[in-house]
Image (cartoon, rainbow, N blue to C red):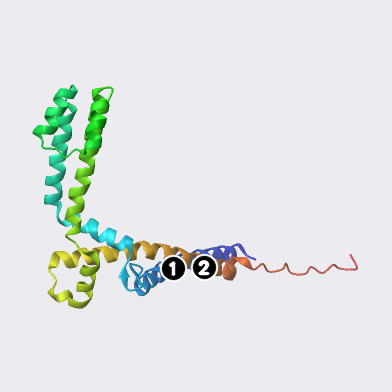
């Protein structure tokens, strides 16, 4: 085969492979859209609910920041407590809700660092609880049903939460499906362009040589 022919074959294979990648990405996006990977038996999946909750928190950034700032200040002042007597006053002054079993652990702690750790853990739990209370205001399943049935009557912010969450889940699955589709197309391309080997032309030997 001439050198030009080999180069043309390689160039074609490269173009076909590029085309396979593009088609694979397109196929992945199509499958992700058609199969609605954010639903299971018609209801939002756990990952979809989690994503909507995350978007909801993002939309309530002011309230979330206020809560986090409050606990950051509590943590900073806790770090300055030097002994157990001060720690007890700190708990009382800040009106912290410390369970009885934790209070007992604090009393039995061998040093102030250990005692502060018990209080710090309680602060972390309370922080997550307050953030969880915000999310509880947002019923993901109910919100999605309203989106399907009454999208025009929903407020803009809530619609954006649902749309962005759907797009995020579909984008993730589009990459997965696209990779699979591109791989299948790539194998076919290889077989069509590079996999076959032509046999070398038969050389005739001059019997009189």
Contact (CB < 8 A) between labels 1 and 2?
yes
Residue 106 visible within the image: yes
Image quarter (top left, top right, bottom left or bottom right) of the N terminus: bottom right
Tag 1's secondary structure? helix
User: Disc number at residue 184?
Assistant: 2
Q: Is residue 140 left or right of residue 30?
A: left
Quarter-wise, where is residue 147 in the image?
bottom left
| Residue 51: % across, % down | 27, 59
Question: Which one is nearer the viewer's eye here, 86 or 60?
Answer: 86
Neighbourhood count class around disc 2 (C-alpha, 10 Å): few under 14, some 14–19, many 20 upward: some
The residue that label 1 is drawn on is 24
Q: Secondary structure at mark 2?
A: helix
Residue 46: image quadrant is: bottom left
37 on left or right of 140: right
Q: Residue furthest right?
A: 208
The residue positioned farthest toward the bottom in the image shown: 149
Q: x, y (%) of residue 148?
A: 23, 75
- Residue 58 visible within the image: no
Residue 191, image x and y in percent?
Answer: 59, 68
Q: Relative to 7, say whether 92 is above or below.
A: above
What residue sits 24% from the left and 31% below the top? 104
How far apart marks 1 and 2 lie (CA) works out to 8 Å
In this rendering, the answer to whether 70 lies above or below 130 is: above
Q: Residue at x 22, y 37 (%)?
A: 100
Q: Nearer the viewer, residue 84 or 43?
A: 84
Where residue 26 sits, quadrant-wise, is bottom left
Residue at the location (28% across, 62% down)? Answer: 49
Q: Earlier in the sequence, mark 1 or mark 2?
A: 1
Number of labels in the image equals 2
Estimate how packed mark 1 is, as few (under 14), some (14 to 19) or many (20 or more) residues with alpha carbons within 10 Å. many
């Amino acid at each position: 085969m001439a050198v030009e022919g080999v180069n043309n074959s390689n160039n074609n294979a490269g173009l076909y492979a590029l085309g396979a990648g593009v088609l694979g990405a397109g196929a992945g996006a199509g499958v992700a859209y058609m199969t609605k990977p954010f639903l299971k038996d018609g209801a939002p999946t756990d990952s979809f609910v989690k994503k909507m909750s995350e978007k909801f928190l993002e939309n309530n950034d002011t309230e979330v920041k206020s809560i986090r700032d409050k606990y950051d200040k509590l943590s900073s002042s806790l770090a300055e407590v030097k002994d157990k007597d001060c720690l007890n006053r700190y708990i009382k002054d800040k009106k912290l809700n410390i369970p009885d079993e934790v209070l007992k652990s604090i009393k039995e702690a061998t040093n102030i660092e250990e005692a502060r750790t018990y209080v710090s853990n309680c602060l972390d739990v309370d922080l997550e609880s307050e953030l969880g209370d915000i999310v509880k205001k947002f019923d993901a399943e109910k919100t999605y049903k309203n989106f399907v049935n009454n999208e025009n009557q929903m407020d803009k912010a809530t619609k954006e939460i649902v749309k962005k969450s759907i797009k995020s889940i579909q984008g993730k699955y589009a990459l997965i499906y696209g990779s699979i589709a591109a791989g299948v197309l790539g194998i076919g391309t290889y077989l069509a362009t590079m996999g076959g080997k032509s046999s070398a032309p038969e050389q005739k030997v001059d019997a009189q040589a």
